[in-house]
Image (tube, coloured by chain):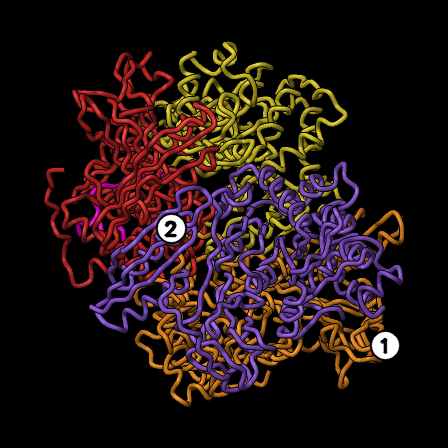
Chain colours: A yellow, B purple, C orange, D red
Amino acid sequence: MVRELITVEGHIIDSDILRRVFNRIVEDGGEFEVVEFTVGKSNDAPSFARIEVAAPDPATLDTILEGLSYLGAQKVVGDVQFGPAEADGVLPDEFYSTTNFDTYVRIDGAWRQVADQRMDCAIVMRAGRPACVKQGHVKHGEPVALRGQGIRVKPPERSRDYGVFGFMSNDLSAEINKSIAIRTTAAEMRRTRAAGERIVLVAGPAVVHSGGDVSLARLVRAGWIDVILTGNAFAVHDMEKSILKTSLGICQLSGRAVEGGNRHHLFTINAVNRQGGIRQAVEAGVVTSGVMFECVRRPIPFVLAGSIRDDGPLKDVITDVVAAQKAYIAALDGAGTCLMLASALHAIAVGNLLPASVRTVCVDMTEAVPTKLSNRGTMQAIGLVTDVGYFLEKLASDLLDGATDAPSRQESPR
Amino acid sequence: MVRELITVEGHIIDSDILRRVFNRIVEDGGEFEVVEFTVGKSNDAPSFARIEVAAPDPATLDTILEGLSYLGAQKVVGDVQFGPAEADGVLPDEFYSTTNFDTYVRIDGAWRQVADQRMDCAIVMRAGRPACVKQGHVKHGEPVALRGQGIRVKPPERSRDYGVFGFMSNDLSAEINKSIAIRTTAAEMRRTRAAGERIVLVAGPAVVHSGGDVSLARLVRAGWIDVILTGNAFAVHDMEKSILKTSLGICQLSGRAVEGGNRHHLFTINAVNRQGGIRQAVEAGVVTSGVMFECVRRPIPFVLAGSIRDDGPLKDVITDVVAAQKAYIAALDGAGTCLMLASALHAIAVGNLLPASVRTVCVDMTEAVPTKLSNRGTMQAIGLVTDVGYFLEKLASDLLDGATDAPSRQESPR
Amino acid sequence: MVRELITVEGHIIDSDILRRVFNRIVEDGGEFEVVEFTVGKSNDAPSFARIEVAAPDPATLDTILEGLSYLGAQKVVGDVQFGPAEADGVLPDEFYSTTNFDTYVRIDGAWRQVADQRMDCAIVMRAGRPACVKQGHVKHGEPVALRGQGIRVKPPERSRDYGVFGFMSNDLSAEINKSIAIRTTAAEMRRTRAAGERIVLVAGPAVVHSGGDVSLARLVRAGWIDVILTGNAFAVHDMEKSILKTSLGICQLSGRAVEGGNRHHLFTINAVNRQGGIRQAVEAGVVTSGVMFECVRRPIPFVLAGSIRDDGPLKDVITDVVAAQKAYIAALDGAGTCLMLASALHAIAVGNLLPASVRTVCVDMTEAVPTKLSNRGTMQAIGLVTDVGYFLEKLASDLLDGATDAPSRQESPR
Amino acid sequence: MVRELITVEGHIIDSDILRRVFNRIVEDGGEFEVVEFTVGKSNDAPSFARIEVAAPDPATLDTILEGLSYLGAQKVVGDVQFGPAEADGVLPDEFYSTTNFDTYVRIDGAWRQVADQRMDCAIVMRAGRPACVKQGHVKHGEPVALRGQGIRVKPPERSRDYGVFGFMSNDLSAEINKSIAIRTTAAEMRRTRAAGERIVLVAGPAVVHSGGDVSLARLVRAGWIDVILTGNAFAVHDMEKSILKTSLGICQLSGRAVEGGNRHHLFTINAVNRQGGIRQAVEAGVVTSGVMFECVRRPIPFVLAGSIRDDGPLKDVITDVVAAQKAYIAALDGAGTCLMLASALHAIAVGNLLPASVRTVCVDMTEAVPTKLSNRGTMQAIGLVTDVGYFLEKLASDLLDGATDAPSRQESPR
């Protein structure tokens, strides 16, 4: 048997880390002995464990230790190693792949936090600091962190006195009282504002089809949304409603389909593109209401990412998905809360780009998307299985009734 | 080739009957020639077709003609034949099985409408008139109608000037503006009242879990519901909320699960059964709010049907399912509209017992139950995929805001 | 602040118990200090913790301590208290409500295991031993255990070297390689046989509609199923297929609906009831293939529980749900593995009646039922979102290819 | 009242067109009188109707007539009008928007069929013939067909003797015997081959996760697939399985998640991109099995369309969605059958690009995508709610057992 000592510390019981360490060792074919254990004596104190891991051969031990490193367990305290990128977008095979948890690398004996934390990235030294960089954006010769020593992950700890947000995580049942969850979301948005952070909204076209656009427009007008990340369809149907009073050809007054109504979204794209884009269409008086109208008027930024399903598309759409991804990344800077409403493609794209520390509320009529997001490790996430029209109506009512405007956001230095 | 002439009449194009006649003939191996066709010249006039059906052999022709009889096509005009039930609950093998459409049988040369129309029944002569009787309730020796001549089905026709209710049928998409459908439902309830018909509610426990019970209690109090058909769980969780402020152990103020809260529904059953039942528990002041409370107070009747899942059950529950089915049947008499909310077992049970002419609104978070109901031939049905809490809140707001009470129901002679 | 010392021991980290203890204390408004902690040094050794709980007032402390008792934490070591049932089915209000985990009560200083462990029951002294009894079955005057001291719950511990079954629990994704899970299920069935335990099958009618009945009949014939718990519809459609080659009127060769095919299930009920029941219909040669046929032939027992949806029903159906529940309870005795296939009503009913130690495999096309079962605390459960026809075909192929018969079950003394 | 005579002909009863004509007139506020009606006397003969439409004012009449034109009803027999595109991608506002049904325009008194039929396009005169062109691809000044006279749509008619494919359309229930539908799909693929048409496959990554890739690779190797349309994820996970034996980090032998396995797909992208692309990676021996391997080896073409969710992406991915859409369009040329497997984004994109005459089989675990596709008017579509791994295993077994290779496709002159 070969052996190695590891240490792990923090709220490792509350955060379910110690249990996963034990499981990982045994599942991968090892054994362990707990050499030292100090449990945090009270709510505030962290725990500490020193564990001897044993395995039948060095290869198994390495596998175990790498698995444990993703759980924050430390083996050795050497510096992280770097290797040069072989070509643009081609990493050395031993590259370390990031999670969405805060990560530190040891350089010249000092632990430095990695910038721009997000999952499935390489860690690259750029401008003198380690940063998460998407594989495709790494340049030839840049130093790429290699897996092994000198990398420390800090999984998000559920504080022992966590508030209302925490207890709802991972509960996706449709059979709950949603008004409580919506109240919690409103409280979280107020907290985000108070902390000087930004509120990001990701929306799919069903927001418009379900009639939720009316409440969303109110929220934008009152300043509760800082940026909208979406695609061609949401913007088209929102403006279709302003121009033609239908959404995907369904009359929003009678609920009836208009024969030939599939023409309406093309007509809308045509009318807006003729003006040169959304802002110009609002300014020309072609679009006079709705979410996009309020975005232009306030103004707040929006990013429309293209997809192969798109008709048109609108001139505002970024049709190259790599460029669109970069635009989303830029828009997410400073985010404290993210609302993902009735969107699959764009919600999952944003989930891939967010650090775990950003709180997300994912609303959909089925469990599929919320489940997928939580499987990808988005820990601080509420999944709400409900009607998005209901969600927005209640949320707007909670945030706007009796109030006039959102508390102004102070740009924090983060 | 053997041949037979059939006739079919009514709004057979609008109601999609002629197309199904053609399909049926060809699918079952026959051919047809349209001998005579008169199309209704205007919105109001019915159409008429005389069709010669040809088949390679008499057995195939019989199969085709039987299939067509379910679509209202007429072959011959002899009297219906009856055979005696072999034993209690045992029919002659050639028994005719009913649909949920209006049915007539020819006796002594005259067409008589079958009473108590519902699907999957035998037609039995009882007290001098033909009536739908569930197989299990047929008595030894009773005359049972046999399939073949002398039976005429009248499929529901979609009038050419049908109103708002019709166009929504068979549209189950979650991505629609539900406020329109809810407004339509409210209008339908007003129409039902004006027609002197009854409004039946079928509810599952998720009505309580989702917080919809508050609005439902308002509707009962204001007289908008005439009878509630449900099971043990709905009544228990509704009263648990009155007694302990939880629903299935989930606090309805904070949304948090109470550890050991699974005790609460047993505690509730215990407290109510100690008094002798729901009415007694209300009168004793044990239950002081909620849907069951309002039912007792107004009063309106409710029927609780048992299931093998039940804890307890409450003393009010009918634990024999055959007896419960009879009680449901009695409660459905005179129904004009039926709301089915977040219920699977009891909604499908009621769907089996309703004639197609009763308009139903089926609300659930997934398509499964509404789809099943429409597959069973419940034609005049709206399926709404949305949050039942939302549905009830909006419905109560539409019906009660500005109004004080439901229009009183005049008992019609039907 | 009031304080109390509690102890908790076992594989409390692996089994996620310690984390839940900490959470419970803080969520309910308390604080804690870990006075003593011994972690199991190796895979096999249990851990031990002594924790001081503090709360602002005695009522809060009581709430916390009761919550902790459900997690296996011990406060005091007095004997359990009993109170007499007030009437048949009416408990003293302070009754203790059981979980589906092994439970012990302290009587005259000795800990005795509670018999017939299942959830949502009272603990009653009957025939000199403590046993789980459904509320409705408790008799006037019987001694009922009261909540408070002297009750110890032993949550199921995930052994540190648990096998293939464990790692799959709580993973409900449809996007996994199901052949692995099916292989695991087959291995578990072999293990159950080797242990002399019984294999219980719960089935819904979709087993027949999806064509899975063919493989299921093979499994019954080869002796892999010990009892079938189901309802009227499964048995009817299985025998409809034998008699008329359709399932709910859908031809099982061509997949086409037969117009008027809704008559077929009534015809089947009629043909079987005429003989006096299922066994008699098999013996008379009316039913000559299928699952029910194989059950009669081998023979293995089956229990058909009635529901208000039923047509007919078959004479074999127990129409009183309380009696049906008792019959299910009797049939579950000695169960080691339970397969729940495409059933909602009966699967959840069985989930309510099983101790947590019985391993269950729940197969359905949507997450709803598996999720509901795991929410109710059925810990040792695999949920498989897949086609039940596929599951049965693969399972039968794994268990039967190359083998001739199931290992015969030795009745163990349990 | 203003009036207009229209005519409609074809299998207008079987194809449900006449009913929709009547409904459209009444719903839009008009009345009608059937002036002349000749029903097709036998299976083969078309029907003919001349109908007088009346409306209260000219605007209403125009609305009605436009709606009817989408149903194939003819008003006047003038030539189609054209107007020039105002700019690249900007149409004249009166542009006609296409359906996915065969369309004819009248030019110089002659009816000419529109080329490249697909929905949501403009009809543009290009190279001397009318063709469907996506809005964004129309060039400044090109002649664009305007709505109004001279456009004739031919909705797909369900032949009175349609075969096995037809009867399954629009039946999405999960509770059916899927083996029948899979056999039908295999028959359809054989028919497609015999007709010299192409078989297109659209696949999502769940094909790999569910283990269906093994059977799909067999089908590609045997020549049953002519082109694969997919995205980055499918190709990555397919090759991940070849290189690392996992799919999204899930071991495909044990079903267990590998801690840190999220690194695997990035490693795969890196290994393949290092070689310069998929073909090069196969040739270099980096990828040695799987679907992509078989595509390169046979060879058959594949198109990978980018999305904003993508990691990497692979060098083969077309990251601009407009360019990707064009590549898909080119790949669909000559398609006779299209299989859409466990894909949402790419399946809907392809649905938008296909004429209604191409038969599609859409397989998914939920109804959502098949429903969406059929709502968009993809008429000749079977939706199958089942496990895609099951579907592929059965399909491969049906097509390949006993056979050695697909019948070679003769390029037809279409």
Quarter-of-image position of residue B316: bottom right
Please tell me whether residue B313 belongs to the stretch shown in magenta: no
Q: Is residue C339 visible?
A: no
| Quarter of the image that includes the C terminus of chain B | bottom right
Q: Residue C348: x percent and y percent?
A: 59, 65
Question: In terms of image quadrants, where is residue C346?
Answer: bottom right
Image location (x, y in percent) of residue A129: 50, 22
User: Residue C51 at x, y = what percent?
Assistant: 77, 54
Label 2 to label 1, Cα distance in Å? Answer: 61 Å
Q: Are marks 2 and 1 in contact (CB under 8 Å)?
A: no
Position of the N terminus of chain B by quadrant: bottom left
Quick one: D57 or C237, which is closer to the camera?
Answer: D57
Chain of the residue under label 1: C
Q: Residue furthest top?
A: A284
Residue C114 image position (x, y, % from top left): 71, 76
Q: Secondary structure at mark 1?
A: strand
Mark 2 vs mark 1: same chain? no
Which span is picked out in magenta?
Answer: D215-233
For disc 2, the chain is: D
In this picture, residue C194 sits left or right of residue B299 = left
Among all residues in the image, which is located at the extreme front? Answer: B109
Residue highlighted by disc 1: C84
Q: Label 1 is placed on what type of residue?
A: Pro
